[in-house]
Image: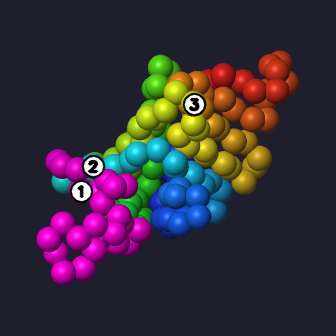
Amino acid sequence: MKALTCEQVEYDDDTLEWVFRFGTTASLRVAAPWRIVAHGRIELGCDDHRRKFGHPEPVDAVAMALALLGGRTVESFSVSPVSGDAIIDLAHGTRLEIFNSSSGYEAWVLAETNGRTFVAQGGGRLVEYPPSATSGPLRER
């Protein structure tokens, strides 16, 4: 993920998942709560989507997320070994934080076009597929 650029943000009304696309080589599907921190504050959260907050028009979190993340390069991607929470630090002090909020449901899936997939399972376990030559079908990370 390092050095990739966020190029697209989508919301899937059917699955209620968010999709963040990084370059042409990685996509991140998120089914858990997330927020974007920038300018020293929470600028946007997944629950803001389509809320009015007293404004004439509802929040378009897809457009706002792309405005906040689009064109910014990934500087680091870290995952909590206990919870499976993910933090993606991007250029200019912008951060996408994903919170694994379930002991049973998958929080997020990072799929790379080279076939590698990382899954933050419920309960916080992170697995990688395909496995390396020396591990079983799923390798814990």
Of label 3 and label 2, which has the lower sequence position? 2
Instruction: State the residue lying farthest toward the bottom.
Output: 56
Model colouring: rainbow
Question: Is 86 rendered above or below residue 16?
Answer: above
The span picked out in magenta is: 40-63
Q: Position of residue 3 (x, y in %)?
A: 50, 50
CA distance for labels 3 and 1:
29 Å
Crowding at label 1, few (<14), some or many (≥20) Cα neighbours within 10 Å? some
The residue where tag 1 is placed is 43
Residue beneath label 2, please?
37
User: Hey, what amino acid is under mark 2?
Assistant: Val
Disc nearer the start of the sequence (3/1): 1
Q: For the residues carrying marks 3 and 1, which lies nearer the camera in this image? A: 3
- Disc 3 from disc 2: Cα separation: 27 Å
Q: Which residue is mark 3?
A: 104
Q: Residue at x 35, y 64 (%)?
A: 49
